[in-house]
Amino acid sequence: HHILTPLHRLTVAADRKAASKRPGDEVYSLSVSVRGLIEDAEQAQTELEKSRESLLQAEKMVSVGKLAAGMAHSIRNPLTSVKMRLFSLNRTLGLSNTQKDDFHVISEEINHVDTIVQNFLEFSRAPKLKIQNVHPSELVDMVLQLLRHRLESYDVKTSVVRSGDLPEIQGDPEQLKEVLVNLMENACEAMEGGGQIIIEEEQAVQEPFGRVVLIRLKDNGPGIQKSLQPKIMEPFFTTKEEGTGLGLSIASRIVEEHGGKMDFVSSEGEGTTFIIVLPIKSATPKEHGIERHPDYR
């Protein structure tokens, strides 16, 4: 603002004089030059503000990651002791059916806490990718088979729209499977009373990635409130009573570590579509935390 304000004043003054001059006059040229200078300065200011926001977000993520790791380790150690003690008691004590039910409930709650701790640990460190050749279409089929019983319990029907198998990409199949599982489970939970998930696959050319594979997961649930949409991918933001708010954040980061991006579109009452964009084989994933699989060529 300290730079732009005097430039704006200068351009206004030059414009007044240029109004009575013809193109080619010095005052007119000055006016045009100053206007160009202002546009350049405003663009630089915009880029600077974006960079500052990115830096602040990066610093925030580092701090949150350290906090998450510390909390996770502090909880996991005593939690492991409790689990071992509970397992031992369950084996040695003569429990009634009611007590066995109570032990089962306690075990389930401990497993839930353990899952939360695991999410904290995953969030606190960048995913280390074991890169190999991956067939995205096979991965989709594998996840559908893996979640078959879960989908049935939610009364959710699925269908896959593909004109042919997607081409190979370079990636970590386990990490990418985690992304798909997370999105599928979120969709199931959103569609209370059953619904439908449509998975669409296609190839495309998309800047700045070049050739990519696109995987869209569409549900016909209630959609995401417009006021919540800007926050939905933020870490620790959740609308679930027992959620950690880390699932989508971790999924998005895994996709980004593969050199791609994850986005969504949602309309209240019409459902939500998550879009996974991944570079095709010739593209190079982010060189961060990458471990080449021994079978990779």
Image (spheres, rainbow, N blue to C red):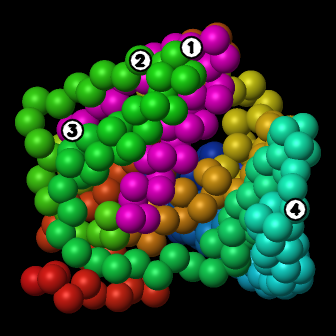
Residue 273: image x %, image y %? 48, 30
Asked whether the beta carbons under mark 1 and mark 2 sit within 8 Å of each other, the answer is: yes
Indicate which disc residue 259 carries.
Answer: none
**Residue 160 against residue 34 in the figure, above or below:** above
Callout 4: helix, strand or loop? loop
Assess whether mark 2 and mark 3 are in contact (beta carbons under 8 angstroms): no
Measure how far apart labels 3 and 2 are at the Cα level. 21 Å
Which residue in the protein does label 3 denote? Answer: 202
How far apart are the alpha carbons under marks 1 and 2?
8 Å
Badge 1 or badge 2: first in the primary sequence: 2
| Image coords of residue 7 (percent x, y) | 75, 68
Return the residue nearer the eye: 225 or 111. 111
Task: Name the amino acid, label 2.
Answer: Lys
Q: Is residue 291 magenta?
A: no
Q: Name the foreground residue: 243 vs 12.
A: 243
Estimate the spatial distance between the alpha carbons at disc 4 and disc 1, rounded to whole Å: 41 Å
Q: CA distance from mark 1 to mark 3?
A: 27 Å
Decide whether residue 194 is among the magenta residues: yes
Residues shaded magenta:
174-202
SS under mark 1: loop
Q: Give the mark nearest the N terminus, 3 or 4.
A: 4
Question: How would you rate the neighbour count of disc 2 (Cα within 10 Å): few for under 14, some for 14-19, many for 20 or more?
Answer: some
Mark 3 crowd level (few <14, some 14–19, many ≥20, 10 Å Cα): some
- The answer for how far apart the CA atoms under marks 4 and 2 are is 44 Å
Given the image, on which type of amino acid does mark 1 rest? Gly
Label 1: which residue? 194
Asked if the residues shown at circle 4 and circle 1 are in contact, with their CB atoms under 8 angstroms apart, the answer is: no
Tell me which corner region of the image, top left, top right, bottom left or bottom right, holds residue 75: bottom right
Q: Residue at x 57, y 68 (%)?
A: 40
Query: What residue does disc 4 label?
Result: 93
- Label at residue 157: 2
